[in-house]
Amino acid sequence: LQSPCAVAVYDDRLRLSHLNDAMAELLGLPAEHIRRLRPSEIGGRPQSEALERDMLRVLTTGRAEDVRTHLRADGEDGAYAWLARLAPVTDDAGRVRGVTMAAHDFTEHHRARERLQLVNEASVRIGTTLDVTRTAQELADVCVPALADFVSVDLLDPRGGEPPAPLTAPLSLRRAAHQSVNPGVPEALAEPGQVLTYPSGSPQADSLTSGRTVAVTLPHPDMEQWLAVDTERRDRMRALGIHSSMAVPLRARGVTLGVAVLRRFRRPDPFSPDDVLLAEEVTARAAVCVDNARRFSRERETALALQRSLLPRSLPRTAGVDAASRYLPAARAGVGGDWFDVIPLSGMRVAMVVADVVGHGIQASATMGRLRTAVRTLADIDLAPDELLTHLDDLVVRLSEEAGGEGSPGEVGATCLYAVYDPVSRRCTLARAGHPAPLMLPPGGAPRTVELPAGPPLGLGGLPFESAELYLSEGSVLAFYTDGLIESRLRDVDAARDDLCAALAAPSGSLDETCDRILRGLLPAGGAADDVALLLPRTRGLPASQVATWDIPADPALVAPIRKQVLAQLDTWELSAVSFTAELVVSELVTNAIRYGSHPIRLRLIHDTATLICEVSDTSHTAPHLRRAKTWDEGGRGLLLVAQLTQRWGSRHTADGKTIWAELGLVEEE
C-alpha cells in the first residue's frame, strides 16, 4: 500500500478492505467513507458495474487481468481513464481470498487519442458534398457530443457571395445548421435559414470582428450584458444550465465565412485550452470545405444563370407544332450544356433541335450559347438537317482548336438532333450527331423509336451525316431528349427507355403534364446526375384548303391570267384586304422566275390565320440578291419592292432547285 500507484484491496465478497492515499485521491472520496463498499456502490455507474464483474471473474478463476475503465466517484463517466491490473490475493494454501487492483491514470493519453480521433473523424465526415448547408451540418454533427453538448453554425453568406471586410458589429448571420445532445434541439432559437443579428459584446460578434476564438465560462460580465438585452436567449440558457460557451470563427483562404458556437450544459467541465485548440483544428478543416462548397455554389449559380439566359424563355407559337419543354440542371455535377430550341422557318415549316455539350460549368454553358446561335443562323438559311450538322461540326472543330491552344485540340464536343417539320406535306426530316434517337407517338398508337442513322458526335470532323424522312399524322407527338434523362447508374438504358415510352403513352390533358410525368417517372428523388433537356412537340397539319398551287407557263405574257387566279383565290379566303400587295409580290416573283430561272416553275400560296406566304420555285440554283438600283438603271428594283411590302422574304435551296418566298402579315378587320 506504500506504492505510488493507486492500489486497493477487496475481500472475497468484493468489499473494499484497504486502499492507499493515491487511490483515495483518485476516487475523490475519503477512505473512511468507502471502506466495506463494493465497486458498484462506490461508483454507481455502468463502468463501475463492469469493473465489479471483471473483479468477480478474477476472484473465481484466480487469473490476473488487465482492464480499462473510465470512472469518477461522483458518477461522471469519461472524466478519468484508468488502466487497472486485477490480481488474485491468495492465502498460504493457495486459496483466493480477495482481489487487488493497481490503477494507473492515463487520462491525458486517453484524451490525446480522443482528440486525434475527433480530428480524423472530422476529416472523413465533413465535406462529403459540395453543399454549404450540408457541410455546416456535418461540422455540427461531428462536434456533438464529442466536444460540446450543443453546436450552432451561422454563416455570413451561405449562398456563395463574398462576405464584407472588415466586419463590424452588429452582424447579421444566417443559421446554417445546429445539433444538440437533446432531441429537438431545445437550445436553438432559430431554425436553419433564419437570420440572426448579433450585437457587439456577443461571443459571435466578438469572435468574427477579432478573428479569434472567444471562450467564456458563465456567468461572465460581457455575456451577462448581452443576455440582459436578449432575455429569451438568457432564459433558455439558464433553463438548460449552460455553463460554458465557445465561439470559433470559420476562416478559409483569408476570408471569414461565419462562426461556430459550442456550448456545454450536460458535461460539467468547462472548455479547456486543449478543447479550444481542438475546436479550432476541426473548424479550420470545416471552413475549407465550406469555402469550397461556397465557391462551387457561386460558380453553379453563375453557370445556371448563364444557361437559363441562353435557353429560350418561351417556345414560339407556330402553325406546325404545339410544344412543351423542360430543362433541369444536374443535381451534383454542375450545370452542363444541354439545350433545346424551336425555330420557325419559311413556308410554315418549323425546326426542332435538342443538343448536349460535353462537360459542365460556365465553359459548357458558353459553348452551348455559341452553338445555339450558330444553329439559328444556319436554320435561317434553310439548310437541310444533314447539311446543317456538317456546318455545325466544322464550328465545333474550330472551337475545340481554340480551346486547346497551340498544337493540341481542347475537349469541346457535343451531340445534336435536328428536325424540320412541314405542316403542308406533314413530312419531317431528321438527322442526328451521336444523339439519342427520338420517340414518336402517333395518334391512337403506341410509342416507338424513330429509326435514324446515328451519325458521329460533333467535333470529330470530316465524317458524313445522313438524314431520314417520315410522314407524321396530325397530332403525332415527338419526344426529343438528352441522355441525362435515361442514363443512370441505377437503371439500364433500355429499361429507362421503356419507362419513357410508358410515360409518353399515358393519357394526359396537355404536353406540360406529360413533361412533368416523364420527369417524375424517370428521375430519382435527389435529382439527375446529368443535365436533362426535354422537348415534346405535337404536330399540326395545314388543311389542303389553305394551300393553292399553280404551274407557271414560260411565256411572261401569260402571267396576267395567273394574277387573276391569285386574286380569285384571295377572295375565296376572304383576304381581299391584301390582294393589291399580294398581286404585286406575285407578279414580281413570277416574272423574275420566268426571266432568270429554269423551268418548270411553280407558284404556291399558303394561308394561315396571321400570314399569307407566297412561294415561287424553279430548278435553277442561282439565288437572287437584294441591291439598290442606280438612277439610270431600268431594273433591279423588284426585290427591293418585295422587301418593303412584306414582313420578310428569302430563298432556300431544294433538292431540285430553289424557292423564293415572301410573307405578308394579315391585319384582322375590326
Image (tube, rainbow, N blue to C red):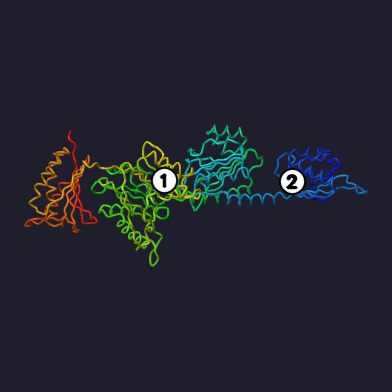
Question: Can you tell which quarter of the image residue 51 is in?
Answer: top right
Q: Position of residue 407 (x, y in %)?
A: 39, 67
| Left-right relation of 239 to 47 | left
| Left-right relation of 304 to 57 | left
Q: Viewer-proximal residue, 151 or 435?
A: 435
In the image, what residue type sits under mark 2?
Thr
Question: Is residue 164 among what the camera can see?
Answer: no
Label 1: state its secondary structure: strand
Q: Position of residue 62 (x, y in %)?
A: 85, 48
Question: Can you tell which quarter of the image residue 453 is in?
Answer: bottom left
Q: Residue furthest front?
A: 445
In the image, what residue type sits under mark 1?
Leu
Look at 69% across and 50% down and name the residue there: 110
Q: Is residue 261 above or below residue 655?
A: above
Label 2: state its secondary structure: strand
Q: Viewer-proximal residue, 361 or 31?
A: 361
Q: Which mark is residue 69?
A: 2
Q: Earlier in the sequence, mark 1 or mark 2?
A: 2
| Left-right relation of 639 to 457 | left
| Left-right relation of 207 to 337 | right
Q: Which mark is residue 46?
A: none
Q: Which mark is residue 328?
A: 1
Q: Nearer the viewer, mark 1 or mark 2?
A: 1
